[in-house]
Amino acid sequence: MERRGSGFKKILDAYEAEERYKEELKPVFYTDGYNFFLTLWNLNYAYDKAQNKAQNKAQKSMMSDREHLLLLLKENPSLTQVELSEMMNKSRRAIQMLMKELLDEGVIERTGSKKTGSWLVK
């Protein structure tokens, strides 16, 4: 038998290594003495929810790329430029130029680090 309990550490390490991991989404282990329970939270839930909501609004009103980008960032401020380009079916360069324009105008602001920061829509 492998060392007892070694899988718990592997699960926690794998979750913490994920890009969208947050402390409140940490796996929950529970036992009632007879059964063992493990709750694994969906790390993509906010990402998928933001994408679907923004796409539905974009399709209904045919909003501009600028409005679509702002809506996506309001729904999920931790989105990366790569994720935004996939959601909007645009090149990463197009997203970079649009975001630079918004930054220069003071419409959006970056808070935190490049890797773990988020976007603030004013």
Image (cartoon, helix red, strand yellow):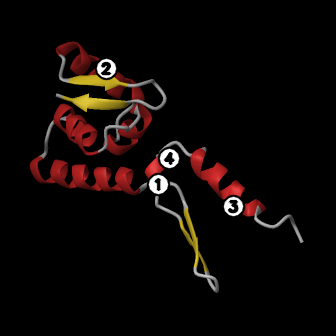
Residue 48 pos. (x, y %): 36, 55
Q: Earlier in the sequence, mark 3 or mark 4?
A: 3
Between the C-alphas of marks 1 and 3, the distance is: 15 Å
Label 1 sits on residue: 25
Quadrant position of the C terminus in the picture: top left
Label 4 sits on residue: 21
Amino acid type of the residue tagged 2 in the rendering: Met
Label 2 sits on residue: 97
Residue 99 pos. (x, y %): 29, 23
Q: Nearer the viewer, residue 114 or 98?
A: 114
For mark 3, give the secondary structure: helix
Amino acid type of the residue tagged 1 in the rendering: Leu
Q: Are marks 3 and 4 in contact (CB under 8 Å)?
A: no
> Which of the 4 quarters of the picture holds residue 81?
top left
Mark 1 or 2: the one toward you: 1
Label 3 sits on residue: 8
Q: Earlier in the sequence, mark 2 or mark 4?
A: 4
Q: Count the marks: how many?
A: 4
Amino acid type of the residue tagged 4 in the rendering: Tyr
Q: Nearer the viewer, residue 118 or 26?
A: 26
